[in-house]
Amino acid sequence: MQDALTTLLLSALANRTFRYWSLLPAVLLFVALTLYPLVNLVRMSVSTIEFAQGVEIWRFTPRANFAQLLADDALRPALVNTLVFVVVSVTIEMLIGLALAIAVAGLARGKTWARTAMILPILVPPVAIGSMWKLMYNYDFGIFNQALVALGAAPVNWLGSTSLALASVIVVDIWHWVPFVFLILFAAVEGLPVDLIEAARVDGATRWQIVWRIMIPLLRPAIVVAFLFRTILAFKVFDEVFLLTSGGPGTATELINLHLYKVFFEQNQLGYGALLSLAVIAAIVAFLLVAQRVTVAVRAS
Amino acid sequence: MDLMTMMRASAAALMLAGLATTPAAAQKPFADVGKQAPITILVASTPWYPAFEKVVGLYEQQTGNQIKLDTTPFGGMLEKARNAVRSGKSPYDLMFLDTQWTIEFYEGGFLAPLKEIDASFDLPKEVLSYGDSGWWNAQKRWRTPDGGKLMAYTVLGNVQLLYYRADILKQAGIAPPKTWADVLTACTKLTDPPKMYGFVARGEKGNGIRYDWHSVMLAEGGSVVKDPAAGDYTVTINSPQVKAALDLYTDLLKKCGPPNYGTLGQGDVIQLLSTGKAAMGDVVTAAFASFEDPAKSAVVGKLETVALPAGRGGASGAVVGNWNAVVPKDVPDSQKKAALAFTRWFLSYDAQRAFAQAGGIPNRSDVYTSDLAKESKLRWMPAYLETQKFARQELGYAEGAQVEQILGLRLNQAVIGEMSSGKALNTAAKEIQDLFVKNGRKTGALPPLPE
């Protein structure tokens, strides 16, 4: 009896040990692919990195890097523009994406075609989107101004006006990313329990009441997922804006990632660039935490 | 033989046939460089790339040596070059670097001085100096042959020229402008938006506005720093002369350009000229070939060029924007020698002549004084050669890229009216001085301009 118990205990121990050992490759991979670059980024952020005689030279300069971060004049407009960009574009994308998801899911015919057409913009590479919209926004040759002139209106300085450039860039982002929100929410709408909606209808609920009181509360987990993904991606926007305006005119469309690119790649300031990257990561996390608190507060009220 | 090689060989054969008929070809043979190891060149996808590709085809056909071209968009060139030299084993035997990037590579010790590959190597005396951007004096941290080593040679030397529509100016009774003030007077007269813009140049934030405006600033007698060659980094960007140049440039863009002048890039300026919507423009020499291509241009044969105009004091200014060829120090010796062999061949008179005929910009003065300059499609040559008399390298110090970022933003803010010119230049001066202080340079500042 005791032997059997011992064998059982040993076997359990071996199983547990094996379980831990079996995790090792995944842990090593995680460390190699995620943790090491992050640790290296932190190390870089407190250093100045230069090259001499073909060799990297690292100097420990945390105070200088932080002082540069605080004194960086280009950072403030970039942060403000990024916040405006994220809040406006994500809000509009969520609203349009949700409306489209509910509308397309309710179609009796042509649902497949409508769904396919809706997701087309997300398939276009960002570089092509930037070039295409830049042409369309062109003051002299763009289709928008050609149409305005044909209608007897004055052409608009879409990308060259400081008051309009950021809005023009946001429109492109909305066009590009509404399909993403639509896709997530459309799948969620399709998965809603039909009997619940039918029951509400039998009870005399209007279409608006069904959407507002039944569908949206049930869609909340999917909405949160879409919101989180879009917010993170919106903070990371780069290619479209780089191609459309390169951050100009002036600082009108300067976003945090454009600034980061210039510091890292054009100015070759690897240490300060790393510190800036960490600041961006911190800003995204802070924004998401605030958004989460607001959601909880709204839900509680 | 793959399709590309066959096409290159055919193009080369056709060019050779053409060259054989010229007297110059009969007198001066191409350099004989013997059998060499195959090499790989990192080259940017630029308007002059097709011409370079043709010349490489000619080299392969003549010598039997092989060259692989890694053609990369401009935006990816610097990172590819950095990765290549920092990896410790460069995949490229020859790399083309924008002149602005070369300091980083010289200072980083990533390159092989050309004379260390072959002590007998010298640049032919006919090769234009382009502000000596290929030389590096490590002690002075300055690009100069005085105590410096030859690290690079110019593959393509771009300078800005003033392009003008000969037909339109003639019709309006206006002579080709000689000063920037003349340009302003003429363009104000010719502007009739949105049908015709009198003058176009880059106003976009960053390198675009900094580079185009810099020539006007030099012509007005301004400078960014006092005497960097002598180690004096006193910031002079907020002088009255620089302010005058910025106000003049703003007037040119605002009064004569399209309403989106603050976002115009090189592609936009070329597009406005080639579609016939601009009467004058400040554009790189390399764009000339595209203006003469009926598939791309509505103004074939109508655009003429002159050297960039002078300032109020009569002096002219132009900035050289050249591509330098460099050899990474960590490639095997046989590859370095093969890269240098191609260099000898490429810098020979006939190769440069072939480059010009294919649409490139040659770097030898004797090509510009040859019969080629009389050819209609190369009628930009006299203006180009004239510009070499006063064109110079600018921002040739380690902080150059950061100074360009500062100026690129502040100038753009001034021309679009986000800041007054005085405030923009005072702000830029402060930022540049802080940068020099941080890096331990001997620096100083001028009294601020009224804002």
Image (tube, coloured by chain):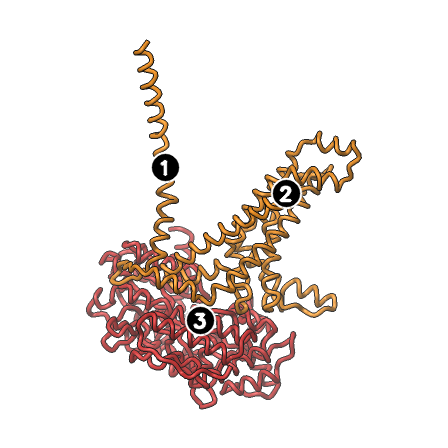
Chain colours: A orange, B red
From what the image shows, is residue A212 above or below residue B285? above
Residue toward you, A205 or B213: A205
Q: Which residue occupies the extreme left position in the image?
A: B119
Local packing at callout 1 (Cα closer than 10 Å; few below 14, some 14-19, many 20+) is few
Q: Which mark is residue A80?
A: none
Residue type of the residue flagged with mark 3: Ile
For residue B298, what is the image quadrant? bottom right
Of residues B278 and B311, the one nearer the viewer is B311
Amino acid, disc 2 = Thr
Question: Of the residues tagged 2 and 3, which is closer to the observer?
Answer: 3
Badge 1 sits on which subunit? A
Q: Output the chain of dot 3.
A: B
Q: Look at mark 1 in the image and give the residue it sits on.
A: A27
Q: Return the residue at label 3.
A: B406
Q: Nearer the viewer, residue B298 or A115?
A: A115
At x 65% / y 62%, what residue is drawn? A143
In front: A258, or B258?
A258
Residue at the extreme bottom of the image, as rendered:
B313
* Left/right of residue B426 with respect to residue B195 in the rendered view: left
Residue B118 appears in which quarter of the rendering? bottom left
Q: Helix, strand or loop at disc 3?
A: helix
Q: Give how far across and how far down residue A68 sits, in percent.
A: 40, 65
How many labels, in total?
3
Residue hosting label 2 = A116
* Residue occupying the point 35% across, 43% down: A32
Say whether residue B360 is left or right of residue A220. Answer: left
Q: Amino acid at mark 1?
A: Val
Q: Chain of mark 2?
A: A
Circle 2 residues within 10 Å: few <14, some 14–19, many ≥20: few
Residue B152: image location, x then y, percent: 30, 68
Q: Mark yes or no: residue A298 visible.
A: yes
